[in-house]
Image (tube, grey):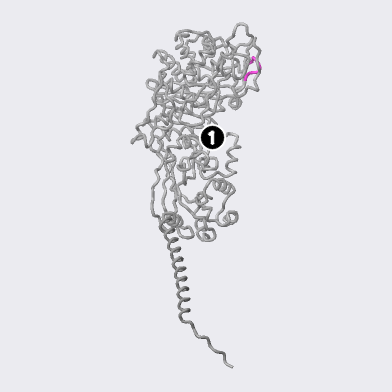
Amino acid sequence: MRKRRSIKDARSEVSLFRVRALVGFVLILIGLSVMVSRYVYLQVQRNDEFVTRSDNNRVKPRAIPPARGLIFDRNGVLLADNVPAFRLEVVPEQVPDMKAMLASIGSVIPVGEDDIDAFKKQLKQSRRFESVPLKLRLTEDEIDRFAVNRWRFPGLDVVPYLTRRYPYGALFAHVIGYVGRIDADDLNRLDPVRYKGTTHVGRSGLERSYEDMLHGTPGYELVEVNADGRTQRVLETHPPVPGKNVYLSIDVRVQRAATEAFDGRPGAAVAIDPRNGQVLAMVSVPSFDPNLFVNGIGHADYQSLTEAVDRPLYNRALRGVYPPGSTVKPFLALGGLEYGLRRPEDTVLSTGEFCIPGQSRCYRDDKRGGDGTVNMVRAIQLSTNTYFYKLAIDMGIDRLSGWMSRLGFGSKTGIDLLGEAEGILPSREWKATRSKSGWFPGETIIAGIGQGYWAVTPLQLAHATATLAGRGTPYAPRLVMATQASVKDPKDPLPNPAGQSLIHKPSDWNVINQGMEAVITGGTGQKQFIGFPLVVAGKSGTAERFSRRTNDYDNNKNTAYLAARHRAWFIAYTPTDAPRIAVSALLEAGAWGAQDSGPIVRRILEAWMASEGGAVPARPTEEPPTSVPRAAPVPEPEPDDIEDQPVATPADMPAARPSDTSNNPSDDGGSP
């Protein structure tokens, strides 16, 4: 039986459809409204934010380090240069596995432990999107091998940069110094904005002292990168401001002549223009190659430098302290005139020894039997110890130290170079900080001949000599003569204000100058300046390194023996009517001051004459006999040997730092 069909309710179905259609339309409208609202929110309200994010994914800022300022000598000879090079840089956020990358990169480019250590230290201080140098100064072969394997190392790239180069190497190492890679300690103290993108900073010498001037200001550029982070194009560039160039007062010819004159023997020399304090030469021997330090010195090279017996890293001119010996006698004589304790014609009888009443131990003169009756000029010429023993006692240690401090002893000269040593100027105050035994007359006596506690740097002695040559007008020594910012013409120097003259009567200077001229014409310096065309004033000094053990003269005249016991000094200035150069030279091991250091000073003066356009005099093959015979010196003590020297009792020659030098000449090494 067939089932009967139901009759459709058309009206009901239409009504249901309409309801469903309306609900669907409302839902669609709501969905569209939500979508439009979201679109408005993202594209309108947060438009700037998302545009910036997009650009950040596409555009990256890249720092442009400034070119470091160049360094020239006084004649425009380039002493510190910037040369193009390539380095391997790493962007940490683009490296999937940093440990694996460091392990595998060595198969393509040799990377040492020092490079990795420096990289890891700098990595901790850098942001992940900032590039960090992994290896500096890549060779062409290393660049080629990396180009072939670049696909293996995402986040690594070869980047060009400028690196420091010192064309004269060791010749200016102690003056100019060197730059080195920035490490973690540097990042903590340096301005992160100013050193953005910079990899090197001044480590020593003028590179460190003038870092702010030489460094410059970094720039930046906006570059468009692809999904792999590789640069596609440069959108915008803001160039850096390069560092300022620096012009030194040093003449490279004088510097080279001074270095060669030492012939590898440890010592130092400084030449200063007494008219303005400009340093014409500053040498410390031995030296080192500063180029080794620029991109990170290897362990073997550094160990060889630090363990070398002759200490090539030690700046003897600036930091080395030594007893000055008889080179202080002209300064002491000038103090006697200034204090009114001596007149030029006053005489002293030199019998070979000087004794303080009540003491059993006497102080010896330069030669057996003494020099007889001497006035001030003669005492300087012959370096008569007795004259200066008595002058030191009459002056007293307080006035002696007060006068010598005005000449710059016992304090920094103020040179524009960091790390200068102060030295030691004997005084009650200095000894009181180190001993409770008080000051004794015997210590004043030996201070009068530049021994005992005395310790001066070659720079200090050159500064004092330049002050004397300038008729008592002191100038702070200056290495930088001009800068790119200060003058258009480097021949026009920076101002260096003069101090107040220390000499009140021109006649006092004339007496000292006459005595120092006599050293050259008829004293210990006669042989060394034969045929020199200008009038030279000088003084030698042979400072002793060991105190005597007996009252006997040491008759050993072996040169090697004496050189092991003496510091050899010579100071000079020329021309004496209007001095333009003052020099001090020291040999750490020299038998006699004039004989060993005098030729060094002459070589410096000859090079200076040549640089000034003068003819260098020919040296004679024969030497006339010395007009003033000298006795063989007997060693004196030096401040470095306190622990090896005997301590005297107060009744004899008491001294907290025993350095009785009365047993020997204070100086002067003429022919033994």
Depth order, front residue of 91/65: 91
**Which picture quadrant has residue 507?**
top left
| Residue 273: % across, % down | 41, 26
Q: Position of residue 665 (x, y in %)?
A: 56, 17
Give left or right: position of 429 versus 614.
Answer: right
Q: Give the camera-side residue of 533 and 647.
A: 647
Q: Which residue is pictured at 47% across the width and 78% down the height?
A: 12
Seen as rendered, the residue at the extreme bottom is: 1
Answer few, some or many: residues within 10 Å of disc 1's Cα (few below 14, many 20 plus, some between 14 and 19). Answer: many
Mark 1 lies on residue: 286
User: Please, is residue 123 above or below residue 19 in the view?
Assistant: above
x and y, in percent, of residue 168 in the image: 46, 40
User: Which corner quadrant holds the C terminus?
Assistant: top right
Q: Magenta span covers which residues? A: 547-552
In the rendered image, residue 21, in percent from the top left (x then y), is placed at: 45, 73
Foreground: 645 or 436?
436
Q: Is residue 150 visible?
A: yes
Q: Amino acid at mark 1?
A: Pro
Drawn side of residue 97 relative to residue 200, left or right: right
Circle count? 1
Q: Is residue 632 visible?
A: no
- In the rendered image, which quarter is residue 359 located in? top right
Residue that sits furthest to the top in the current view: 357
Q: In the picture shown, does residue 605 fall above or below 301? A: above
Classified by dominant secondary structure, the portion drawn in magenta counts as loop
Outermost residue toward the left in this view: 488
Q: Is 338 positioned to the left or the right of 103 in the image?
A: left
